Image (cartoon, grey):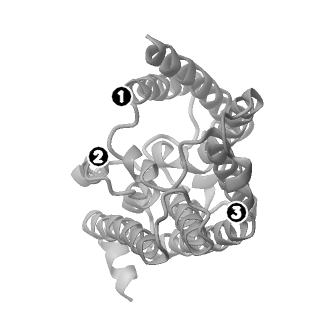
Amino acid sequence: SNRDRQWWQLWLFIGGIFLVTVWYSWANYGGDVSYGRLASKGFEKAPTSFHFLHVAAPLFLMILTRLRMPVSTTFLLLSSFAASGKSIWAVTFKSVSGYGIAIVVAFAVWFAFGKAMKRWFTGEAHPAWRVGQWITSGLLWSVWLQQDAANVAVYLPRSLGTWEFVAFAGAIFGGLGLLFAMGGERIQEVVDEKSDVVDVRAATVIDFIYAIILYVFKIVSQVPMSTTWVFVGLLAGRELAMAMNKSNSSERTFGEALRLARRDLIYVAIGFAVALALAAAINPAVGEALWD
């Protein structure tokens, strides 16, 4: 069927970018697939033993995701391995800053150009837009991996040998295929409920701005950050601006957009609270530092 061909094509494209991106990091960062994210203070040492909750953390992530909560994988996984409370607060500060900057940038862009986009993005999109979406999606995926590969690599030695890298890359590549075959599952609804995100032209603009913000934060420091918080901020700022200048086709009011943005923020805050509870339960030193 056409859908079967689409997910296979998407898997090979996204999977190929994943393999190239993590291979580049592995080859140029001394076997590290996280682009140096885990070299930052508090995450530089690989775990020598695992607590039950280390293994359970991904399960919490799956449960919260099934509940349509846009939970930060960075907080839920990395916090469990943090060597100190200071490292968690460094990640928190960078992530909250990302949320704030994303919501301001998105609001400014869509408040200034939202009405123009509504006029431009009518009728059937030119085929060139499809090419543009593939390019921006590939760019975003690569930059996102440079931030979030650390969430998986935190379970691994900080320097992978050849066969360790092959096993890591092969497992993730296969997992991506399963994810695309399932169509993104329920968490995709968090995006689909936003105004005018289905149009290829709107999706291309969102991908491009998201990629630029992540790239800027990548070069600011090696401290890991939550890309989920940035994305939620981006969608919130866009939704609020489109409601304010009435450039959304859904005719959602500003009050409705504000409630939607607040709900998403509450969800990521819940994930943050769960992550802190896990970190404190696994590592008493982290718990003590958090409340000092």
Q: Which residue is mark 2?
A: 62
Q: Nearer the viewer, residue 215 or 38?
A: 215
Q: Nearer the viewer, mark 1 or mark 2?
A: 1
> With 102 as the anchor, is 27 left or right in this view?
right
Residue 157: assigned label: none
Q: Nearer the viewer, residue 76 or 216?
A: 216
Q: Which residue is mark 1?
A: 182
Residue 115: assigned label: 3
> With 72 as the anchor, is 163 left or right in this view?
right
Precedes in sequence: disc 3 or disc 2: 2
Secondary element type, mark 1: helix
Residue 115's x, y, as percent?
A: 70, 63
Residue 3's x, y, as percent?
A: 45, 19
Quadrant of image for the N terminus: top left
The residue type indicated by label 1 comes to Met
The 10 Å Cα crowd at callout 3, few under 14, some 14 to 19, many 20 or more, is some
